[in-house]
Amino acid sequence: MVALIAATLITAASVSLSYRSALQGSGDALKLMALGVAVSLEATLSRMEKGRETLFSDIITEGRWEGLAFIALCDQQGRTLLHSNVHLINRRMPDSQISQVAEKGTPLHDYTTLGTGERVFILYFPVHLPEGRAILKLALHTYPAEKILREARTQAALISFITLALWVMAFFFIRAMKRSERMEKTIAEREQMAVLGEMASILAHEIRNPLGSIKGFAQYVMEQDHLRSRQYLDIIVAESQRLETLTEDLLRYAKPEKTSPTVFGLLELAEEVMYLNRTAGPSSNRIRLTTDIPEGLTIKTDRDKLKQILINILQNAHDALSECSGFALSECSKTALDGHSETGALINISATEVARGNISIIIQDNGPGMDSKTLGSAMQPFFTTKTRGTGLGLAIVGKLIRALNGYIELQSEQGRGTTIKMTFPKETT
Ligand SMILES: Nc1ncnc2c1ncn2[C@@H]1O[C@H](COP(=O)(O)OP(=O)(O)OP(=O)(O)O)[C@@H](O)[C@H]1O
Ligand SMILES: [Mg+2]
């Protein structure tokens, strides 16, 4: 890409340079030719005493010098002494350039348009003849010079076209490369997922059976033996339940996702998951859950999967806020959420319809937030900063979001909180 930009700049500079030198070269060529003709005519005129009247017309008709449009010899007042068009001899033709050349005694050149509409190059050349000073006026056709310019322009257009074609090719090449890179990544991810999934489901099944027996027996003994071993049995049951959740998560993560979309209201779903979250833990009554979802906003997608996504994200926000809304309310829940004024431990779910028929769902908390390293790894399977976490919560979220054709963006700032934004198509088929 850098090489292409550099090549384009160099080409543009060289094209503009060569065009400019062609422009200058064409002007110089005309000037040189006119001067050559003028010097030679001055010599001829000095030698001739008779028969001058037809000299210029003869030169034009014989085509002695290619490109001559007309020749005139004027006195210092602008009267034509000789002209290639003999009818114009002895006429006064007002021309400010003639008086200028007569005054300064140096040649002058200019471009002018003839009555025929043709643009010509004109040289005013002071000559010294036996009878006194006069001015030679030579008009040259510009088409030979224009030919050089046309060629330069064609060359510039060709080079620009080639450069443009190179850019178009580079654009498609880069796009194809990026697409193949993405495909390779997806394939690698799928392969990884397949292996991981297989391992996870084997592991989950292997754990599930003995676990069922352990939990069952513990519960049975607990019912029999009321006092002595109750404390230990409580631990066995709680830990078995934890393992049970882990195996469920593993299976959920490993399972290939099939979606069955239905149309449902987002506010209703949010209230459902908020209710589950409110009853989730000891610090629940300290956390305020709010929604900003327009009534009647619907989406067509897999309800169970979206519900699971919201549950997992709300659980994380809840966990994060429990950390700081413990007994001493620390720094972390002091910031207000976007569009809200109150502080304290807060979680807000908002949803809106955005451009191109998409729905955006944002879950915000004003918990402790994440440092950049945690933020970078949060979606990875088995990444956790919690003593009793599995690290599968957000990995499952990621997987489910992919299954619903959505995407997720995580933003977090330490001490200010976390914002998770998800975008889903309004209708999944
Ligand atoms: N809202 C949040 N605020 C602060 N940190 C968060 C938040 N959400 C996620 N995290 C960080 O991301 C990590 C990964 O989250 P994830 O849900 O995948 O696993 P977990 O919550 O640790 O475990 P599990 O979900 O299995 O209980 C968390 O351990 C935590 O460090
Ligand atoms: Mg979690």
Image (tube, rainbow, N blue to C red):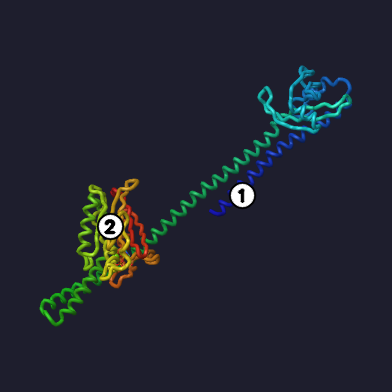
In this view, 16 is above or below 55? below
Q: Which residue lies furthest to the top in this view?
A: 87
Q: Which amino acid does label 2 sit on?
A: Asn
Residue, x 70% and y 39% (percent of image)? 24
Tell me if 421 is positioned left or right of 57 in this view. Answer: left
Counting residues from the start of the chain, the first of labels 1 and 2 encountered is 1
The answer to whether the residue labelled 1 contacts the one labelled 2, judged by CB atoms less than 8 Å apart, is no
Percent x, y of residue 87: 77, 17
Residue, x 19% and y 72% (percent of image)? 212
The image quarter in which residue 153 lies: top right
Tell me if 312 is positioned left or right of 158 in this view. Answer: left
Tell me if 387 is positioned left or right of 223 in this view. Answer: right
Question: For the residues marked 1 and 2, what is the alpha-carbon distance in whole angstroms?
Answer: 55 Å
Percent x, y of residue 251: 27, 65
- Secondary structure of the residue carrying numbered label 1: helix
10 Å crowding of disc 2: few (<14), some (14-19), many (20+): many
Percent x, y of residue 328: 27, 70
Residue, x 23% and y 47% (percent of image)? 296
Say which residue label 1 marks.
10
Mark 2 close to ligand 1, CB under 8 Å:
no
- Between circles 1 and 2, the one closer to the viewer is 2
Report ligand 2 position as a quadrant. bottom left
Say which residue label 2 marks.
348
Percent x, y of residue 202: 28, 69
Can residue 312 be seen at all in this image of the molecule? no
10 Å crowding of disc 1: few (<14), some (14-19), many (20+): few
Q: Is 113 or 213 nearer to us in this picture?
A: 113
Mark 1 close to ligand 1, CB under 8 Å:
no
